[in-house]
Image (cartoon, rainbow, N blue to C red):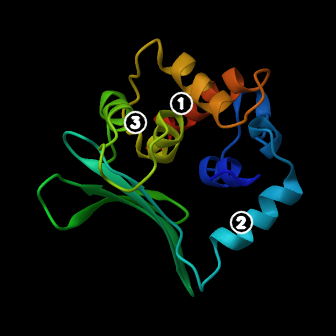
Amino acid sequence: MARPGFWANHLLGFGGIGSGGVYPAPEWFGDDGADTDALSELLLDADRWPVFRIPAAAGPGAVVIYRNMVGDYGTDYLLTHPGRSHAHRIACWDGDFTGTGLTWPELVRIADNPAPAADGVRDPAARLLLVLPLLADPEVPTQAPTRLSAALTAVGAPRATAPRTAEYLLTHLATRR
């Protein structure tokens, strides 16, 4: 996640044009196109399946899997439950988003409550950004853009572009259904 180009790859895959015909760009995340392209090759390498675990202290956690089967590339989002040995797929992205998704409060709960003894992503900003593609609620609280902008800045997005990036992501996620 710390490599240049990761967040642009993870969050700009939804496509679409922003307000005023503006296309989102890797620079919104502090990346350049070459870094984003190079990391895309790594994330989509058929010999690797990057997995990001986001265990939660109470309630469901999540797992994000870059599924890299030849001819079947996509990103799977699974929910994990305390006390259960298996996870279930809640959504996937393979050109289109399919699945049920989560509300903003559910995303924030997962982001803010890492399981103390579990292996996985611990940083609340990275946790929120990893599960952000699951947002399925067009009604987000008024503080959501500020929270998302702070998370983007925490992972390296420029302060000058983070608010615009947050607004774009929230608007686009809310209208993709």
Which residue is rendered at x = 72% and y = 55% of the image? 3
**Relative to 39, residue 55 above or below:** above
Q: Quadrant of residue 162?
A: top right
Q: How many numbered callouts?
A: 3
- Would residue 74 be seen by someone viewing this image from the given angle? yes
Residue type for callout 3: Ala
Q: Residues within 10 Å of mark 2 (few under 14, many from 20)?
A: some
Q: Position of residue 12 (x, y in %)?
A: 66, 48
**Relative to 119, residue 174 above or below:** above
Q: What label sits on residue 111 in the rendered view?
A: 3
Residue type for callout 1: Leu
Q: Position of residue 67 (x, y in %)?
A: 49, 74
Q: Are marks 2 and 1 in contact (CB under 8 Å)?
A: no
Look at the numbered disc 2 and give the secondary structure of its residue.
helix
Q: Are marks 3 and 1 in contact (CB under 8 Å)?
A: no
**Relative to 45, residue 6 above or below:** above
- Would residue 99 be seen by someone viewing this image from the given angle? no
Q: What label sits on residue 40 in the rendered view?
A: 2
Name the one closer to the observer, 79 or 19.
79
Kindly report the distance in space between the C-alpha atoms of the residues bearing marks 2 and 3.
24 Å
Residue type for callout 2: Ser
User: In the rendered structure, which disc, 2 or 3, sits on the residue that comes first in sequence?
Assistant: 2
User: Which residue corresponds to mark 1?
Assistant: 170
Q: Position of residue 22 (x, y in %)?
A: 79, 34
Look at the numbered disc 3 and give the secondary structure of its residue.
helix
Look at the numbered disc 1 and give the secondary structure of its residue.
helix
Q: Is 20 placed left or right of 107 in the picture?
A: right
Q: Is 51 placed left or right of 37 in the picture?
A: left
Kindly report the distance in space between the C-alpha atoms of the residues bearing marks 3 and 1.
16 Å
User: In the rendered structure, which disc, 2 or 1, sits on the residue that comes first in sequence?
Assistant: 2
User: In the rendered structure, which disc, 3 or 1, sits on the residue that comes first in sequence?
Assistant: 3
